[in-house]
């Protein structure tokens, strides 16, 4: 019996069409699915996952099921679920507990539900599921073979858990794979964040001053796309090396206290909390737009915004207008949550092809190596990273050179 709690099962047909569109643009994951579909290497393996329930995630989940896994899926954000996709997955025998617009209580109910299913492997995006298992189900966590983590924020949380000596099972940091962060974080988030801002507001970016908080790979991608659309881009950073990179990439760099006076559009991408606070909001231009591209809705202090506002109204589907005590109006997008997944559809399928290929292959690695893995964070094996890149190039019909034997020997030698 399939277990589920979703919005509307009648949306399944529409969801299947969306999933097929994603599959067309995720050829690497489809190739991997076909490679192992007969041997079913995950036969009898139970996987609990907390991921954005999108058409791209559906391609991953279908792959895991085709390999024999029993999958329990919860969201990793209350507002990112595509209800038609959730319905399609249930119709195909996946246990899904997700619908768009969940309350905080409903969201954590779904997380706790999949945590309670005694998973062999845990797949997460943001570490809410990992943390719930450790805090509320320690006995279940102790029997988990291993897990994966999709995003920077989740890896940061798990590093802290590992440093405290409390990590109960090995976790592969999929986010740290080069075929993930160099493409998903940079090109995927860069494009989808701008997509979300434009869908929510329909503003003209050209000529505006855009402030990007954080110059990690996500921030790089967003800054690059904003520059390409004609914005004058300012970067704020706390890391001197990243700040120097931003300067040499052609961006202005300054503290958020200074940037807040001149920005038209603000986008946070730091993985930290309270990046934009009341003191910044109070000196912003009338009409400034606030958007978040970090995993959790903590980067823009919505609590501060509510406190210094005398009026609030919804002016567009994903746009809240706040009138401040000084009379200025600020516009918060997507409730301060991930703007690319709330106001748009998330990353393009082409980059999720590589990220989710790494997720799928990491489940096989955990199953095959679980008895010798320690309770710590692991990077994706280099061979796996290179396999995903080679398969991606192959599907794009791009060929590359190979080293000759003479060149290999030269690289091994210290002699001239």
Image (cartoon, helix red, strand yellow):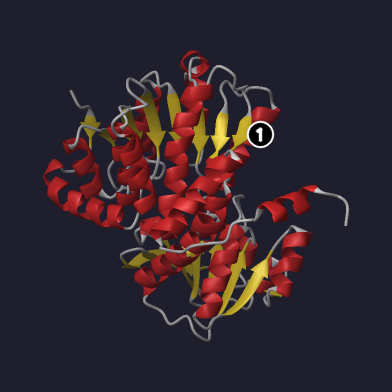
Compared to 380, does 134 lie above or below?
above
- Residue 378 screen position, x and y as percent: 61, 33
Residue at the (23%, 40%) spot, across then down: 89
Relative horizontal placement of residue 40, taking residue 181 as reference (left or right): left
Residue at the (64%, 62%) spot, across then down: 215
Residue at the (28%, 56%) spot, across then down: 24
Foreground pick, 232 / 55: 55
Q: In the rendered image, which quarter contains the C terminus?
A: bottom right
- Residue 143 screen position, x and y as percent: 49, 15
Q: In the rendered image, which quarter contains the N terminus?
A: top left
For label 1, the residue is: 160
Residue at the (59%, 45%) spot, across then down: 176
Q: How many marks?
A: 1
- The answer, for residue 243, to whether it is visible in the render is yes
**Which residue extends farthest right?**
415
- Residue 310 screen position, x and y as percent: 46, 64
Compared to 52, does 73 lie above or below?
above
**Mark 1: few, some, or many residues within 10 Å (few <14, many ≥20)?**
few
- Secondary element at image label 1: helix
Relative horizontal placement of residue 246, taking residue 363 as reference (left or right): right
Relative horizontal placement of residue 307, taking residue 192 as reference (left or right): right
- The answer, for residue 277, to whether it is visible in the render is no
The quadrant holding residue 313 is bottom left
**Which residue extends farthest front?**
406
The quadrant holding residue 153 is top right
**Which residue extends farthest left?**
10
């Amino acid at each position: 019996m399939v277990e589920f709690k979703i919005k509307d099962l009648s949306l399944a047909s529409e969801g299947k069409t969306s999933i097929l569109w994603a599959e067309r643009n995720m050829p690497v994951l489809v190739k991997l699915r076909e490679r192992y579909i007969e041997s079913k290497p995950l036969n009898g393996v139970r996987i609990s996952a907390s991921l954005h329930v999108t058409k791209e995630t559906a391609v991953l989940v279908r792959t895991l099921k085709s390999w024999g896994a029993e999958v329990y899926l919860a969201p990793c954000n209350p507002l990112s679920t595509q209800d038609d996709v959730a319905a399609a997955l249930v119709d195909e025998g996946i246990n899904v507990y997700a619908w768009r617009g969940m309350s905080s209580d409903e969201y954590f109910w779904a997380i706790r539900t999949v945590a309670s299913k005694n998973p062999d492997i845990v797949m997460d995006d943001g570490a809410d599921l990992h943390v719930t298992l450790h805090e509320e189900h320690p006995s279940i966590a102790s029997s988990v073979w291993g897990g994966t983590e999709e995003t920077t924020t989740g890896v940061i949380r798990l590093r802290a858990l590992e440093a405290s000596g409390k990590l109960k099972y090995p976790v592969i940091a999929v986010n740290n794979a080069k075929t993930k962060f160099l493409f998903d974080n940079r090109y995927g988030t860069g494009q989808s964040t701008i997509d979300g801002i434009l869908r929510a507001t329909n503003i003209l970016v050209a000529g505006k001053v855009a402030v990007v908080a954080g110059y990690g790979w996500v921030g790089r991608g967003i800054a690059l796309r904003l520059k390409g659309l004609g914005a004058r881009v300012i970067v704020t950073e706390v890391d001197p090396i990243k700040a120097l990179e931003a300067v040499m990439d052609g961006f202005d760099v300054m503290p958020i206290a200074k940037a807040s006076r001149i920005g038209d559009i603000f986008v946070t991408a730091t993985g930290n909390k309270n990046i934009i606070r009341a003191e910044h909001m109070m000196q912003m231009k009338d009409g400034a737009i606030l958007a978040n591209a970090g995993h959790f809705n903590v980067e823009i202090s919505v609590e501060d915004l509510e406190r210094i506002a005398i009026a609030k109204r919804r002016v567009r589907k994903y746009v809240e207008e706040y009138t401040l005590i000084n009379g200025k109006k600020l516009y918060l997008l997507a409730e301060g949550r991930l703007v690319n997944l709330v106001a748009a559809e998330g990353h393009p399928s082409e980059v999720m092809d590589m990220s989710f290929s790494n997720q799928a292959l990491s489940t096989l690695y955990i199953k095959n190596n679980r008895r010798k893995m320690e309770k710590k964070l692991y990077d994706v094996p280099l061979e796996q990273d290179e396999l995903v890149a080679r398969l991606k190039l192959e599907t794009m019909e791009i060929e590359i050179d190979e080293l000759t034997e003479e060149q290999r020997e030269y690289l091994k030698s210290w002699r001239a």
